[in-house]
């Protein structure tokens, strides 16, 4: 089959399915993206130039749509060039969030399109207004509603959607959900897995060494920001350090912003929180290594004595899935996003997003109660094997592709399949 993937940051959410298709050695895979240094053997990257930003005079509520249609135009021109060169994909798969796919039906009107639908924005009841410390005024509601312009255009294209969790799909209006397939994302269970021997050796990360007899508390976020509970974790750290002298803490994440905004007064959230609680944080026991290589990150999870995952009601992080697969003893914020993955006192502990002492108490309980920790670790891994197996995810992906294209995907090493007529697409 001929696949066209689209994501502004190759390979984005499509890393595993692309690798899976490459492994079959029977597909032609083209990927439209902004230029970057990422590379996968067997994939032909076709870059487009990053479009100019929205005009300064554009209304703030219209700027995201302006940027999206600019990307749609750039990606559409790139697609038209591919078509002129004779490339005719059997299916187009991409992320709708940045608008790149909005014009592709015009280039290939008869090609089925599967778009990643990640989140439907709402001015109240979900992430916005969840944290009273960082309120959103009603004056910003028009901008938040306007963020769904891309969602609405995408939902009116001739194609289908995919979403990685049931809760994320539930944020969409009821009329839209029948167009969005649930593709429960998986984890490489052979990479993210318990490794008892790691716990018997010293681990050095961020310039700090954690000896085998010390206790390691871990926290991970792409960026250290309120959406992922960074202020809550920082306020809990002095309590955790005071409770036990043998605890060391690693705070993985960058100083940018993936979601939300930087502090109103400037600087980073790390700088702001260190000004607030830094006097209670021993730099010999707490490190901020930034973003770390993936292998080091997995080893850190395997060594962790208590892993903290915090989030607003928003998109679930891959790190939550990976921590479950690694058999971490997890303390997580009690919200809808997390409850789809963690059942309290079964495969993790849930605690209030707004209670630093309660978070501290849960972390210390995991470290001091070996029976509880071992049970949660075992159940976390069992959950991952049951719900997060990469093979199950890829099988579901294959089945959806086959239904949409009317073609049979070969397994690795099989003979090329005969092409059948396309299945009728959903209207």
Image: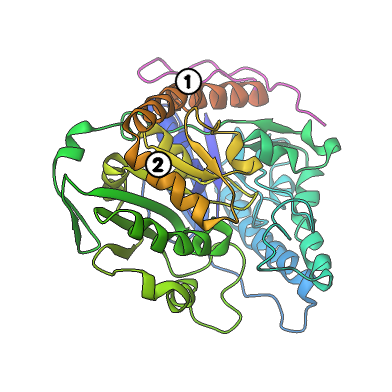
Q: Position of residue 356 (x, y in %)?
A: 52, 57
The residue positioned 62% from the left and 42% from the top of the image is 337
333 relative position to 362: left or right: right
Q: Quadrant of residue 16?
A: top left
Tell which tag, 1 or 2, sits nearer the viewer: 2
Q: Is residue 330 left or right of residue 342?
A: left
- Which residue corresponds to the image point at 84% horizontal and 66% vertical from the top-left? 142
Q: CA distance from mark 1 to mark 2?
A: 27 Å
Labels 1 and 2: the sequence-earlier one: 2
Give the side of residue 25 with respect to residue 93, left or right: left
Q: Secondary structure at mark 2?
A: helix
**Which residue position holds label 2?**
365
Magenta residues? 406-427
- Percent across and percent down for residue 261 are 60, 71
> Visible in this render: residue 64?
yes
* Secondary element type, mark 1: helix
In this rendering, would 167 be left or right of 303? right
Q: Position of residue 220 (x, y in %)?
A: 42, 53
């Amino acid at each position: 089959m001929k696949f066209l993937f689209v994501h502004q940051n190759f390979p984005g959410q499509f890393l595993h399915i692309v690798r899976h298709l490459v492994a079959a050695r029977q597909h032609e895979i083209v990927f439209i993206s902004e230029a970057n240094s990422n590379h996968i053997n067997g994939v032909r990257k076709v870059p487009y130039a990053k479009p100019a930003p929205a005009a300064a005079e554009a209304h703030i509520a219209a700027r995201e749509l302006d940027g999206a249609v600019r990307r749609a135009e750039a990606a559409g021109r790139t697609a038209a060039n591919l078509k002129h060169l004779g490339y005719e994909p059997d299916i187009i798969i991409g992320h709708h969030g940045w608008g790149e796919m909005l014009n592709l039906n015009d280039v290939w009107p008869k090609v089925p399109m599967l778009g990643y639908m990640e989140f439907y924005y709402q001015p109240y009841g979900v992430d916005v207004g969840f944290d009273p410390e960082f309120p959103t005024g009603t004056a910003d509601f028009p901008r938040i509603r306007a963020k769904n312009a891309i969602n609405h255009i995408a939902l009116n294209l001739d194609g289908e959607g995919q979403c990685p969790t049931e809760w994320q799909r539930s944020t969409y209006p009821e009329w839209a959900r029948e167009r969005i397939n649930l593709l429960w994302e998986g984890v490489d269970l052979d990479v993210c897995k318990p490794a008892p021997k790691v716990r018997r050796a010293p681990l050095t990360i961020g310039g700090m060494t954690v000896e085998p007899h010390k206790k390691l508390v871990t926290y991970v976020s792409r960026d250290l920001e309120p959406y992922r509970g960074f202020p809550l974790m920082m306020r809990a750290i002095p309590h955790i350090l005071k409770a036990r002298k043998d605890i060391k803490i690693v705070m993985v994440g960058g100083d940018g912003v993936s979601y939300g905004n930087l502090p109103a007064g400037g600087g980073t959230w790390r700088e702001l929180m260190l000004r607030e609680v830094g006097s209670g944080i021993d730099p010999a026991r707490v490190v901020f290594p930034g973003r770390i290589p993936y292998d080091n990150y997995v080893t850190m999870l395997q060594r962790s004595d208590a892993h903290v995952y915090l989030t607003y009601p928003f998109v679930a992080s891959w790190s939550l899935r990976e921590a479950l697969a690694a058999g971490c003893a997890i303390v997580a914020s009690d919200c809808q996003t997390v409850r789809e993955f963690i059942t309290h006192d079964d495969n993790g502990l849930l605690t209030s997003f707004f209670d630093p002492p309660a978070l501290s108490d849960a972390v210390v309980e995991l470290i001091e109660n070996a029976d509880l920790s071992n049970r949660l670790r075992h159940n976390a891994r069992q959950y991952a094997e049951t719900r997060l197996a990469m093979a199950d995810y890829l099988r579901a992906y294959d089945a959806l592709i086959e239904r949409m294209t009317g073609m049979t995907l070969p397994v690795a090493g099989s003979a090329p399949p005969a092409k059948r007529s396309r299945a009728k697409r959903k209207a």
